[in-house]
Image (spheres, rainbow, N blue to C red):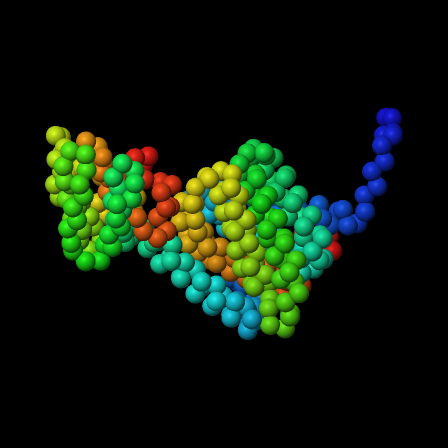
């Protein structure tokens, strides 16, 4: 067999990010099968992985995992470049921006739950702004804010608790730890 | 051997139930509680703030597209507008308004009855008079009965 002339050196960082991203994509795909009462209200389970990566490996890795999750996840479920993809991307970028700030909160008083809830609010905030500017150019979208905010609070809390638990137990989710 | 399967099952169930994990509530730090409380209050406040704004609080009366008067919808009163073919009488009650009488031949705006929603419009075309409700948070004219 001819050796490939293209060399793509793969670092340990790449493997680690790919492993986390794979877990996040699996959660995205699983979640896409769940029925939703209102388009846009989803648990956002993949964000558990992003929170774990943020705590273990820092913001850059979290950003990689989050954005890989959005792109590859949308390819898998056939949403790439559809409106849902841009909403997910805007939400992810909003969350990452807020997580970048939230990681400077004093760790003595604030855990993953705070980060998760703040990120969830940034997520719906970014999505609502995009929806208002592009998809539904009418102030009526704002009336959905209470529902989206409620979902963000509930799912943000649950995701944060799950992430906190994964982080609190060294042996939890060994498939993720192996990478680190 | 005979006890190994139930033991294994028991262990599995215990692990699924969270044995060996810290209790959920210990995962929340003081700041987390404060943030959750603040977020819950904000979310709760967003409901009345955003979902009660559609109540009408003013009736706008126009003739030939020009503003004649604005009537507050907090006290009952009647208002007469002289138009092209006669006098249109607007009646206002708390939270609603209607065209009480109009000289137009077909009486469409009278038969429309009470207007209660923001941006609802009654148009008395023959007399060139319109009655429209407005209120805070109602989209302010971007969305009215005509393109509803």
- Using the image, determine if residue B107 lies above or below residue A70: above
Seen from the viewer's position, the closer of residues B20 and A74 is A74
**Residue at horizontal 52%, vertical 67%?**
B35
Where's residue B97, x and y in %? 20, 48
Seen from the viewer's position, the closer of residues B106 and A150 is B106
The N terminus of chain A: image quadrant:
top right
Seen from the viewer's position, the closer of residues B101 and B20 is B101
The C terminus of chain A: image quadrant:
bottom right
Q: How many marks?
A: 0
**Residue at horizontal 60%, vertical 48%?**
A92
**Residue at horizontal 47%, vertical 68%?**
B37
Where's residue A139, x and y in %? 43, 45
**Residue at horizontal 53%, vertical 36%?**
A83
Where's residue A148, x and y in %? 45, 51
Whether residue B120 is visible to the viewer of this picture, yes or no, is no
Whether residue B96 is visible to the viewer of this picture, yes or no, is yes
- Using the image, determine if residue B51 lies above or below residue B128: below
The single residue placed furthest to the top in the displayed view is A1
Where's residue B28, x and y in %? 55, 69
């Amino acid at each position: 067999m001819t050796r490939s002339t293209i060399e793509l050196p793969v670092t340990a960082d790449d493997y680690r990010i790919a492993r986390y991203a794979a877990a996040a994509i699996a959660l995205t795909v699983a979640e896409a099968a769940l029925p939703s009462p209102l388009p846009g209200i989803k648990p956002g389970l993949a964000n558990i992985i992003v929170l774990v990566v943020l705590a273990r490996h820092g913001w850059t890795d979290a950003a990689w995992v989050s954005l890989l999750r959005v792109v590859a996840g949308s390819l898998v479920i056939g949403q790439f470049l559809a409106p849902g993809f841009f909403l997910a991307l805007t939400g992810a970028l909003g969350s990452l921006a807020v997580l970048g700030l939230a990681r400077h909160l004093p760790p003595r008083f604030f855990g993953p739950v705070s980060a998760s809830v703040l990120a969830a609010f940034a997520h719906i905030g970014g999505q609502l702004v995009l929806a208002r500017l592009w998809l539904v150019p009418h102030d009526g979208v704002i009336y959905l804010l209470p529902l989206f905010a409620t979902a963000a609070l509930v799912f943000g809390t649950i995701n944060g608790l799950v992430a906190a638990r994964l982080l609190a137990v060294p042996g939890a989710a060994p498939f993720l730890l192996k990478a680190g | 051997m005979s006890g190994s399967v139930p033991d294994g099952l028991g262990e599995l169930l215990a692990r699924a139930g969270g044995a060996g994990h810290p209790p959920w509530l210990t995962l929340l730090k003081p700041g987390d509680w404060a943030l959750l409380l603040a977020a819950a209050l904000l979310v709760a406040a967003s409901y009345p703030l955003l979902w009660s704004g559609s109540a009408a609080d003013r009736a706008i009366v126009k003739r030939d597209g020009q503003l004649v008067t604005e009537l507050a919808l907090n006290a009952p009163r009647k208002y007469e507008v002289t138009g092209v073919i006669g006098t249109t009488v607007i009646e206002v009650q708390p939270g609603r308004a209607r065209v009480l009488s109009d000289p137009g031949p077909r009486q469409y705006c009278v038969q429309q009855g009470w207007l209660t929603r923001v941006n609802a419009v009654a148009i008395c075309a023959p007399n060139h008079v319109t009655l429209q409700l407005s209120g805070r948070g109602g989209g302010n004219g971007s969305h009215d009965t005509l393109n509803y």
